[in-house]
Image (cartoon, rainbow, N blue to C red):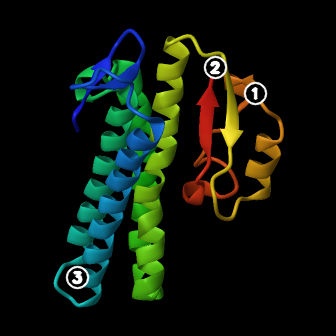
Amino acid sequence: MPYQWDNRLKRFRDKVTGRIAPEATVRAGVEQAIDNGRLEVRASVSALAAGRTTLPDWQRDLRNAARDAHLAVGAVAAGGLRQLTNQALGKIGAYVKQEYKGIAALAASVQELSPAQVAVRAGYYVGSAIRTFEAVYQDVRSEAGATECMNILQPGASCSDCIRLSSMGYIPIGDMPLPGTRDCRSNCNCRLKYR
């Protein structure tokens, strides 16, 4: 990434021009990290279905993919690995621990599901990293002085929860459920705008 973190503004800057990195560029990096994790998951599900890996190895691979996705997007939200505070690491760790419980339950039921069902469910554990990004990013924006946020719908289908939140305009940060925690879960495409 040709960007560096501006700790005063709590935003990324272009290393050459000094301009603030567009939010869309940062979000694209987050989405790429999640997509990469989902690709890993699909490959591991295929290996499991074909008998090229064992269930314990598959479960370990899924845990690693989920952990890596959550850590990667948490680091982006914080401004890089060096910017991750103990609070941010604790938040990331708590979310990953939740995912590990779900992964264990999925592994216990994998024999009852088709490979396609396993792939979709396993993808949720990586996709839920959006919740981690939003939680860490909200803390960073708060540190930068933001006190309110507004939900912004993105193109595509939106759940009723997201539509309702968007109609409220700016509300106190603590009153806004984070994308990834709403009815649409890891399928949420909403963004939060802070001020």
The tag earlier along the polypeptide, 1 or 3, is 3
* Precedes in sequence: disc 2 or disc 3: 3
Kindly identify the amino acid type of the residue bearing the numbered disc 2: Arg
Q: Element at badge 1?
A: loop
Give the labeled residue for mark 2. 195
Q: Earlier in the sequence, mark 1 or mark 2?
A: 1
Looking at the image, do the residues carrying marks 1 and 2 touch, with CB atoms under 8 Å apart? yes
Mark 2 crowd level (few <14, some 14–19, many ≥20, 10 Å Cα):
some
Secondary structure at badge 3 equals helix
- Classify the position of the C terminus by image quarter: top right
Asked whether the beta carbons under mark 1 and mark 3 sit within 8 Å of each other, the answer is no
Which mark, residue 170? 1
Q: Horizontal and vertical percent for residue 191?
A: 59, 42
Viewer-nearest of discs 2 and 3: 2
User: Which disc is residue 47 wearing?
Assistant: 3
Q: Residue drawn 35% across and 65% down? A: 38
Q: Residue furthest front?
A: 17
